[in-house]
Amino acid sequence: MITLNVNIDHIATLRNSRGGSEPEPIIAAGIAELAGATGIVAHLREDRRHMKDRDIRLLREIIQTKFDLEMAATDEIIQIALEIKPDLVTIVPEKRQELTTEGGLDVRANNDSLSTLCKKMHDAGIEVSLFVDPDEMQIEEAKIVGADMVELHTGVYANARGEAQIKQELKEIIAGVEFAHNIRLKVAAGHGLNYVNTQAISRIPNIQELSIGHSIISRAAFVGLDNAVKEMLHIMHNCK
Ligand code: PXP
């Protein structure tokens, strides 16, 4: 059954907006797990705009399910990951000016450094997922550099408008999932998924997990985090 990893970065965004300690990301992680999330995702950005180092350390201690640390492949963050030892690292490209991650990694252009990164993480017992567009060349390259998993970027699908464009983007994701599965990569998907567009993604065979943040945390403001996670799980598991 497809599983849900809840990205709680925006709990930290809200906390940081007043510089205090509320709302506490650690509590959000616990509530999301109790509601049925099978993983918690947090992105430690170079500029620390939401998650702080202290959050990542505490999350490692309290997460009972799976801790997915989203990160750019920079020396500083790699070192932190090797010390903290999350269960999984999801490697993303990172630009200072972007509001959120804007596109998949260019694995081919960075194959040497990514293959070194995979080796270091594996030596420390950490699995590696590479965030890529649903593009066969990038997926194949992820396999070559030694990744365990690819997370397929669903942002273009999420932003598509009109039936034809949505269908086309969905087709590309389906083809990417099939390709990755056939070369024995685990497959996740995420970015821009919400209470409307997630059902079609959940129907795709061989996607193991979804990584969803903004829509769940937004809905939580109205219905509570517990309900927001449960409603998303309901959509994911009743999609046939
Ligand atoms: N997956 C990756 C790799 C991401 O960078 C993000 C955003 O932090 C997400 C999933 C979650 O995206 P959203 O917040 O749009 O659900």
Image: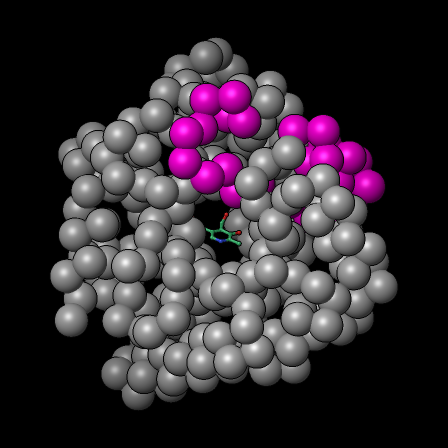
Q: Nearer the viewer, residue 58 or 126?
A: 126
From this view, report whether residue 58 is shown above or below residue 11.
Answer: above
Q: Is 64 placed above or below 174 here? A: above
- Residue 127, can we see it? yes
Q: Is residue 67 magenta?
A: yes
Image quadrant where one finds the C terminus: bottom left
Check residue 79 for magenta coloring.
yes
Q: In front here: 2 or 98?
A: 2
Q: Position of residue 94 (x, y in %)?
A: 67, 51
Residue 62 sits above or below residue 183 on the image? above
Residue 163 on image: x %, y %: 26, 83
Residue drawn at the location 32% of the way across and 33% of the way down: 33
Image check: 56 left or right of 236?
A: right
Residue drawn where x is 46% and y is 17% of the image:
18
Residue drawn at (72%, 29%) of the image: 83
Asked whether, in this view, residue 76 is left or right of residue 33, the answer is right
Residue 81, horizontal then vertical, whole percent: 69, 36
Report which quarter residue 25 is drawn in.
Answer: top left
Q: Which residues are magenta?
A: 59-84
Residue found 31% across the figure and 33% down from its top: 32
Tell me: 208 left or right of 91: left
> Is 52 on the left or on the right of 218, as rendered?
right
Position of residue 139 measured from the top left corner of the image (x, y, whole percent): 61, 74
